[in-house]
Amino acid sequence: MGKRKELKLEIHESGKTSKSPKLCGTNYPVCISFIVVNEFCERFSYYGMKAVLTLYFINYLHWDQNLSTAVYHAFSSLCYFTPVLGALIADSWLGKFKTIVYLSVVYVLGHVVKSVGAIPSVGDSTIHIALSMVGLILIAFGTGGIKPCVAAFGGDQFDEEHTNERRKFFSIFYMSINAGSVLSTVITPILRGNVQCFGGDCYALAFGVPAILMVIALVVFISGSGMYKKSPPEGNVLLDVCRCLGLAIKNRWMSSKYDSKRKHWLDWAEEKYPKRLIHEIKMVLRVLVLYIPLPMFWALFDQQGSRWTLQATRMNMAFGSTFVLKPDQMQMLNALLILMFVPIFDVVVYPLIGLCRINLTPLKKMAVGMIFAALAFGAATLVEVNVMKTVVEPAPHGQCLLQVYNLADSDVKLSIPGSNLFSQPIKSYEDPQAYQHLELGGHNKTITVGINHNGHFHECRETFTEQKAYSLVLHSKTSGIVCQLATDNILKSEKMEAYLRYTHVRCTSGSQDFSINLGLLDSGASYTVILKGGPGQIIPQKMEDVKANNVHIAWQIPQYALMTAGEVMFSITGIEFSYSQAPANMKSVLQAGWLLTVAFGNVIVLIVAEGAGLDQWMEFLLFAGLLVAVCIIFSIMAYFYTYVDPDELDKLFPDQTVNEDEDELKKDQTDDTMYLNSIEKSTKM
């Protein structure tokens, strides 16, 4: 044991790891300032880009909502698969410093490619899609690859005896993550919507600024190179675990009935691996089994950046007459609420529950967190139902939508062969009540419409196409009734615009010019304006074809509050529970497992978005129901789980106990870095 400590001292003295100067006479190395600034810029870069991603797919690439949601969650999923790869590269090949530098270069390239793909003049739509996908893949490998390395590399910079300083560093590091996330979620949507370039929203700028921040992050990190302690790769316990599992499965499969029996299938690896390692893996597997239902929680949680953002685009975002929120800015609410809820739950909620003598174990907290998330989607369902009341649903196959404007001087009555639509007289200049479904029986159909006006019968033949919306405008002339069929736009603007953008229109009638005030045009509405002539004047009559966004965005606050409460009880508690149930040297395995639950949760959303084909409110309800079902399964699993104390391993295997000082240092640093890497998921998207 003494040789190991001697060797460590020789390495430090040999110059392979330089001794960093301290900050202002403290025990904080100067180099940690480079790491904190790097983390702030990188998190700004990632969350800023991701905040506008869903609307970029819809408004720039012109994808539908389901495809946009699927690609968004495919990207999110890849971002949480790649950390496992990054940890393996750092621990088994390059070391943390080189891994951060090389993958940050990949990260920067991804941002640059993504930004170029957002420039309309660069190629056609195929080029834009290709560049966007290549950029997102590079970003996923970059951000995921450095995720398990940066915090751990920062912890490596502290001397063994400076445990308190290292813990405070992680608090500062955590705050830099929060600051980067909140600021980018506020600023990037403003760059997208308030700055116009290339004739529309400036997505090139919204992606370009995060790219610049990532370049700054890389330059700052490299600038501190001469002051860092750079530990060589020491091997990855995840590989040892995988090899042990593989050997146990292989030996168990090849065993015969004459071989001696084993109490546990992992015991088949005893011929090569020590009993302590095998027992540690058994402890980890018991926790990983509890992870199996967890992806469903993340399937709901991660929709804040996709489905909930799309819901916000159909809501009223105005606060008073001066401030209008962007739909992609609502995501910052989760980051702000988590900073409020964590101390409230720790200082108020949990102590009050304890005073009521309720034994709220960690696994029970996680189950309650799932219920909160399900309730959040229940609230989202209620909001969606009310939002849908302002939306005109497209007609199904074989039908079209039709409304009638009567601009004649008196009432008219319509007759459509094979239909009883518009059986009541239509008053002159009456605002149509609603679109009616006209049966076509095929892709299109030419219909003769009969019109009764002042006792005279008129006919007009019009061709209608399925799934389209039409307005039939009737004019009266000396020769009789004249028909005009207009195709309507019933889709709400994802930019929250009215389909009449200008409040003042200048008209010319004869030799006179008229300025017409159209009044207030509400966001999301679609209008038809009829101009009626009079002596020396033109009188506008505004008719609302599609209702305005009259459900205020404040109604999304309850679902964000419920989801954040669920996040506090589920995610933070889950990480703490997991790390309390596994040995110190196995916490990286649990981190990999935890991040994979996030990845698979996004895969679930991808599958449902592309395969279910449900109305949005039904999809929200489906996710809520699935999470409740999963919560029941998880609760049953938790009921049969027995809590363990990993420190008992030293008593069970005294002959395999490692050096106490090194083990304690490794345990402290692993607890901090792995906890921070995982807790980032529970505070940001």
Image: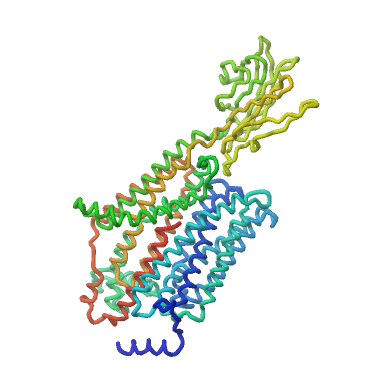
Where is residue 540? Give x, y as percent. Answer: 66, 26
Res. 461 visible in picture: no
Image quadrant for the C terminus? bottom left
| Above or below 500: residue 15 | below
* Residue 278 occupies quadrant: bottom left
Residue sitting at x 23%, y 63%: 643
| Above or below 668: residue 614 | above
Query: Taking 617 as reference, is 118 left or right?
Result: right
Res. 413 visible in picture: yes
| Above or below 211: residue 397 | above
Residue sitting at x 45%, y 36%: 385
Which color scheme did the rendering employ for the protein?
Answer: rainbow
Where is residue 181? Give x, y as percent. Answer: 48, 59
* Residue 9 occupies quadrant: bottom left
Hey, which residue is sitting farthest front in the picture? 24
Image quadrant for the N terminus? bottom left
In front of the other: 148 or 456: 148
* Residue 289 occupies quadrant: bottom left
State how many labels appear: 0
In front of the other: 384 or 346: 346
Hey, which residue is sitting farthest left in the picture? 357
In front of the other: 324 or 433: 324
Where is residue 383? Give x, y as percent. Answer: 44, 39
Hey, which residue is sitting farthest right in the picture? 511
